[in-house]
Amino acid sequence: MIKKLIFCSSLLFLAYGLWLSPDFSQIAAGVAIFLFGMLFLEQGFQGFTGGTLERILRVSTNKRWKSLMFGMVSTTLMQSSSLVTVITISFLSVGILDLAAGIGIIFGANLGTTTGAWLIAGLGLKVKIAAYAMPMLIFGILLVFQKNKALKAVGSILAGMGFLFLGIHYMKEGFDTFRDTINLAEYALTGIKGLFVFTLIGIGMTVIMQSSHAAMVLIITALSVQQITYENALALAIGSNIGTTVTAIIGSMSANITGKRLAVAHLLFNLVTAIIAIFMLEQFMHMVDSIASAMNIAANDATLKLAIFHSLFNLAGIVIMLPFIDLLVHQIERLLKGEQVQIDRPKYLNDEAMKFPDTVVLAVHKETVRLYRHASHIILKTLGLSSVRVFSEKDLHGLLHINEKIAVYDVDKAYKNHIKDIYSEVIAFISQASFTWEMKQSGKLYWLREANRHIVEAIKDCKQLQHNLLLMNSSKNTFIQQEYYKIRYQIAELLRELDVFRLQMESDEAETAVLSFDVFKVKIKEQDAAMNEQIDQLIREHKITAAAGTSLINDSAYMYAIKRHLVDMAETIFVIQEYKLSEAERSIALDDNELDEVLKGA
């Protein structure tokens, strides 16, 4: 609804401007070309998000100052605080960033976006910028049509820069021509009234263009040809800072509660910064004059002084607000508590996660880990055990003896409530991502889809095991009881070992991680062979009946299947999280036939 309203407002604004003066079309064309350039630039930088961005984020946001620097540097390079905001919301939505780190990035992005004003005021208006645009467009478009993804991305960046420069040229020329028809400077307002009116105009401009960078270019080019006064330009710059938060608010609508919290933080920061700038405008103007004098900037160079002001009041906002980030996080979390997350619905799969290949993989990975935790709880409950106790340091034999009697557990209901919907959504999400992106992450998504299938199959096998487990557990035959005790113990033991392995993977380097799973595979093969041999012996010695033996053999097969599914699942989700699961590593892992050869030689 908001997007439609903004779109309709933009059309009305353009129609009125074109009706007012045909010369306005050159300015409008300049803005359109500039925004088209920003679109190309964003597409180009998105081409380099295939794993690189996620790795950079991990190491660049673990400290407050690093988050700030990441936001500032990335926005300076991309010249788009909107793209940085969208990226931040996307990674926040899948849990890679916490809210404090996200706020730090947004603070830095606000400062980084001011570099655009410096480039335009210091370079764009001093040289014939259109001459640089043409070679960039020529080489950029040629590269865009290449099949190589990296070349296409570089081409998009070059073409984007070319369109940006061309847009600036058309805006500047347009304002020169437009002045012959209407001199906007005649509508200048002074004092408090002018400050507030032009601040509101600045907000409106930025909301319509969906880019504070484009708004600042328009303000600077208009100021350079005296279409607006210096004081009114300062107010417009303050307004553009507030208007840019609309991008974050719109982007957060499809995000989860953390994305919405970041949008609120962005709005609060820019509002506080704008209020400081408005009520201390005279002090800021004196500081700008002092800085300009120290930098040997001419007193009448209003465009560079505007760039100084833009950086100065954003820097002041950061200095004032940075010490209060933790308090801000606390208050926003109290304000936006969000809905209670239902365990039977996906938590990380949302539209924001679909915006980048990295976040697609991360969202599916986190949802798969979550699905596994639900599954391990269901499997252990079927065995008459508690996941809290099994994953503690308590003696496993002691737990089994305490919980000798197995309570009836509704596996079907648990599957329906906690597994089915999440599994369906994961598969649908992967299918949609595979359709949307041509990405190298597709291999990771394939293995994650297989991991989800293994989780579901393990639960289904557990259900098959449950009937005899309940029946035979109360058998008077101690030999049967012992064999079913082994089944319960071995599954619980494997789940505990996998949990320990997961914790080790999170803390240690695991160059031979795939090979570590061969230990699990060999062990469960040995256990399967030993159990079948034991069952045969019990039947031969008439310690159990042939019928009971047959049931045990079937249940032993279900146990083996459950364990294999769990190991195959864990091999993906516990190792792939470090993205070291290369094809070469998989090729040197033992397959089933090789495992049999190992066991024969043992």
Image: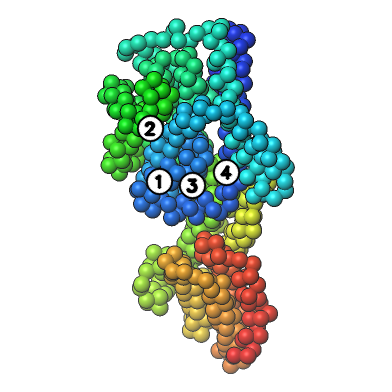
Question: Which mark, by number, is residue 529?
Answer: none
Measured Cα–Cα span from mark 1 to mark 3: 17 Å
Sequence-first tag of 2 and 4: 4
- Indicate the quadrant where residue 9 lies: top right
What's under tag 4, amino acid-wise? Phe
Mark 1, Cα crowd under 10 Å, few <14 / some 14-19 / many 20+, is many
Q: Is residue 250 left or right of residue 133?
A: left
Query: Looking at the image, which residue is at 35% across and 48% down?
Result: 65
Q: Residues within 10 Å of mark 3 (few under 14, many from 20)?
A: many
Which is nearer the N-term, disc 4 or disc 3? 4
Question: What residue is shown with label 4?
Answer: 45
Q: Residue at x 47, y 40 (%)?
A: 76
Q: Give the labeled residue for mark 3.
A: 91
State the CA–CA distance, disc 2 to disc 4.
24 Å
Labelled pair 4, 3 in contact (Cβ < 8 Å): no
Mark 2, mark 4: which one is toward the viewer? Answer: 2
Query: Which element type, helix, strand or loop, lies under badge 1?
Result: helix
